[in-house]
Amino acid sequence: MSLSVCKFGGSSLADGNNISRVTEIIGSDPARRFVVVSAPGKRYSDDIKVTDLLYACYRESVEKGSCAETFQKIRKRFRSIVTELGMDSFDIDGILDETERAIEENKSADFTASRGEYLNARVVAAKLGRTFIDAKDIIFFDDNGRFDESRSYPLISEKLSAAGSAVVPGFYGTGADGKIRTFSRGGSDISGSIVARAMNADVYENWTDVSGFLACDPRIVEKPEKIETISFKELRELSYMGANVLHADSIFPVRKGDIPIRIKNTFRPEDPGTIILPSKKYVKSGNIVTGIAGKRDFTVIFLEKSMMNSEVGFARKVLSVLEQDGINFEHMPSGIDTLSLVIESKFLAGGMLEKLLRQIDAAVRPDYMRVLENIALVATVGHGMASNVGTSARLFSALSEAGINVRMIDQGSSEINIIVGIDNADYEKCIRAIYHEFFRREKASAAED
Ligand code: ASP
């Protein structure tokens, strides 16, 4: 029988009605045996997520020795969830009392934050009549705070297989010191991926409040196309550039196990969503471009020096300056006598840029240095780009037709991504121009054929 690991996000579990939908979704497919849950999210736009309330509880308990005031709000949320679900005999108050006490005793931000997932998983497990398996007993971190695969995978597999079906809280596990540790925010996506990998699932279903990925930001292009199929590689490029549906780190466990991810919408379960496939299983979509994403506010430091290409250690010397100052660079396009560093502008504030320029000048004595500020990067991503002659010509003529000045180009080495650097002010115009060229125009010419 096939096996799906399903993760449900905070908005899918924000109140009792939503949790009822979720239990219906789980019940409608016997393959959905293992479920990973987030803490209850926002019910309306200015609502507060339970995880945020918990961080406030932590601060309150550190400052006042008690978190009673804020914890009362959490108590109310869970009580109404349980009432809406008609779980009258479920002792939520007992569990909440114990949790409040533990928060005050532990005095740990991670422990406190993790309790939203813990409580929600207890409720969902009881509602489904499935075993609750605490993440603290199956997900472990090593001394460096990284996920410990070799310790976790065998335990997950053993405990979940023995249970047959189960509910696991997302977002946390146990650190090397034996204390609760969380992933970064949004980390239940990572927990779901880990469980899917450990169980060697056929699919990792990630249930959220959108029907998958869109070809670009809907705030910039009205009703962009949905992406039905995308490869892990394409997704990595797009999510790195800001296309956020999944936690960026959540793709690694399933990718290693060649397990596809399906993004589904809890509120429109009939929508096919987006399927993210490993390269092996990837089937090319008809589009040359799969998606477009970008980010604003970069600074480009451009260096020129004759015979740079034959100067051994030139790039290393430049990079060690960045390393000394603890600055990360995003891209480093280079030519025969030129090298550019693309850095997020926020790292260069407060005199850091000037300091860096002085240090680079001393380290490599370039003939010429120039700084471009307020640069946005836009990535056009798609496997189809590698095999279609003339793709970059189309992209650049679309930008020139739109009157956009391209300040920098970086094709990287993957052939599935072309990144252009443009002025921040041209950011939206640039995305619209590229979208129009590869999606609207493509559709128009297909209709003409
Ligand atoms: N509840 C956590 C957060 O709000 C983790 C998650 O939902 O994935 O970040």
Image (cartoon, rainbow, N blue to C red):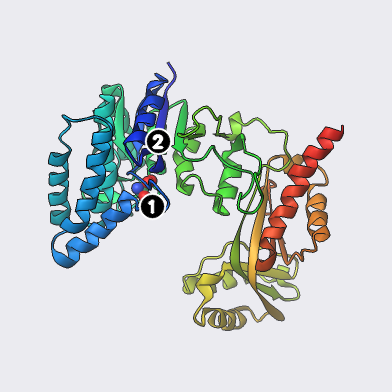
Amino acid carrying label 2: it is Lys
The answer to whether the beta carbon of the residue marked 1 is less than 8 Å from any atom of ligand 1 is: yes
Q: Is residue 284 above or below residue 93?
A: above
* Residue 320 visible in the snapshot: no
Instruction: Provide the secondary structure element on which disc 1 rests.
Output: loop
Amino acid carrying label 1: it is Arg
Instruction: Name the quarter where the C terminus is drawn.
Output: top right
Proximity of marks 1 and 2: CB atoms separated by less than 8 Å? no
Q: Is residue 401 above or below residue 367?
A: above
Q: Where residue 410 sits: x, y (%)?
A: 69, 58
Q: Residue at x 75, y 66 (%)?
A: 336
Mark with earlier residue (1, 2) = 2
Label 2: which residue? 7
Q: Where residue 134 sits: x, y (%)?
A: 24, 37
Disc on res. 185: 1
103 horizontally vs 165: left or right: left
Question: Toward the viewer: 240 or 226?
Answer: 226
Q: Where residue 135 sits: x, y (%)?
A: 27, 39
406 horizontally vs 132: left or right: right
* Mark 1 vs mark 2, CA separation in Å: 15 Å
Q: Quadrant of residue 233?
A: top right
Q: Residue at x 21, y 62 (%)?
A: 60
Q: Quadrant of residue 285?
A: top right
Q: Is residue 85 above or below residue 292?
A: above
Classed neighbour count for the residue bearing mark 2: other residues with Cα under 10 Å, few (<14), some (14–19), many (≥20) = many
Instruction: Provide the secondary structure element on which disc 2 rests.
Output: strand
